[in-house]
């Protein structure tokens, strides 16, 4: 599994490096152009903010493209390396279906965290040399936010543990659900991509209906009893979604692989 995880990470980052480089370059160029125009304004000369704003806009789009690409590439590789011609090679490796799922999931999660880290680093680059009043206002807001967060933790340390557990369980949830939809779509004998799309849309509609008529009333009832009960209901539901999706994918890979061409 470790070798497969390494192979998946190399395949993902081989593409994501270009997106990450674009994010950093646009952040640096946008910051330099903005600094030049701000210096012109301070020297009582007119500055043209069109070009800096253009690169700032490209920078924002590059961040969105990086984050989306990190998730989309993980989903794409799950489909391509399991349910196309590459699937015969992948499924013939000395790795169990559980190991394959974990390698795909962990590589996707690592890629998304790396995308977030690069975005944070690029923001640091962009903020270098900003006017002191802007940075001080931003710093005060950040400090106040962290102070309120630490006060909440001190007042209810158990709530922090629950929030952390919910966060950890929520990270793989969306990816596992998409993996499960892709796996279910391959069980059809024809129009598998279309059926996968139909399954995703149907699942989204079903979730919205459940959320409106079942899940939200449960959350509201739990919140009236205790905030801890409210958190644990969320933890159990998200955990059940993770486990259910994981074992559904595992079942299909182990027992229905003969239906996949």
Image: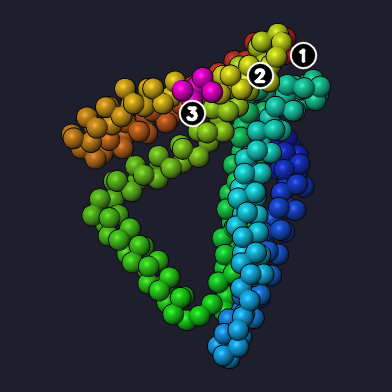
- Choose between 239 and 181: the one closer to the eye: 181
**What are the residue bounds of the magenta stretch?**
201-205
Tell which circle, 1 or 2, labels the residue nearer the N-terminal end.
Answer: 2
Q: Residues within 10 Å of mark 1 (few under 14, many from 20)?
A: few
Calculate the distance from the C-alpha at mark 1 to the C-alpha at mark 3.
Answer: 27 Å
Q: Could you say which quadrant of the image residue 34 lies in?
A: bottom right
Please tell me in which quadrant of the rendered image residue 234 appears: top left
Secondary structure category for the residue under label 1: loop
Q: Secondary structure at mark 3?
A: helix
Residue 242: assigned label: 3
The residue labelled by disc 2 is 194
Secondary structure under the numbered disc 2 in the rendered image:
helix
Residue 182's spot in the image, x, y percent? 63, 23
Mark-to-mark CA distance, 1 and 2: 16 Å
Disc 1: which residue? 261
Of the two numbered discs 1 and 3 on the same chain, state the one appearing first in sequence. 3
Q: Is residue 208 left or right of residue 218?
A: right
Towards the viewer: 9 or 37: 37
The residue at the point 57 percent across, 33 percent down is 175
Question: 79 or 161, which is in the foreground?
Answer: 79
Q: Main secondary structure of the magenta part?
A: helix
Residues 168 and 197: in front is 197
- Which image quarter holds the C terminus? top right
Residue at point 67%, 23% (across, down):
96
Residue 160, numbered circle = none
Q: Name the residue: 44% across, 80% down.
A: 133
Distance in Å between CA atoms under marks 3 and 2: 24 Å
For the residues labelled 3 and 2, say whether their Cβ atoms are less than 8 Å apart: no
Please say whether residue 78 is visible from this viewpoint: yes
């Amino acid at each position: 599994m470790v070798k497969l995880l390494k192979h998946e990470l190399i395949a993902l980052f081989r593409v994501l490096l270009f997106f990450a480089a674009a994010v950093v370059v646009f952040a640096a160029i946008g910051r330099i152009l903005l600094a030049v125009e701000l210096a012109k304004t301070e020297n009582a000369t007119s500055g043209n903010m069109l070009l800096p704003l253009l690169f700032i806009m490209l920078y924002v789009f590059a961040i969105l493209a990086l984050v989306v690409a990190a998730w989309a590439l993980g989903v794409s590789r799950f489909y391509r390396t399991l349910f196309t011609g590459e699937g015969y090679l992948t499924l013939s490796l000395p790795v169990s279906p559980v190991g394959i799922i974990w390698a795909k999931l962990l590589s996707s999660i690592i890629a998304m965290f790396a995308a977030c880290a690069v975005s944070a680093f690029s923001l640091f680059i962009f903020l270098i040399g900003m006017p002191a009043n802007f940075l001080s206002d931003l710093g005060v807001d950040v400090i106040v936010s962290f102070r309120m967060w630490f006060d909440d933790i001190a007042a209810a340390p158990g709530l922090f543990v629950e929030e952390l557990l919910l966060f950890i369980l929520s990270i793989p949830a969306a990816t596992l659900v998409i993996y499960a939809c892709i796996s279910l779509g391959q069980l059809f004998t024809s129009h598998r991509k279309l059926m996968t799309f139909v399954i995703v849309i149907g699942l989204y509609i079903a979730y919205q209906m459940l959320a409106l008529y079942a899940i939200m009333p449960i959350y509201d009832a739990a919140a009236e009893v205790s905030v801890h009960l409210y958190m644990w209901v969320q933890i159990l539901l998200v955990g059940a979604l993770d486990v259910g999706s994981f074992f559904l994918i595992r079942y299909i890979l182990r027992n229905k692989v003969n239906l996949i061409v």
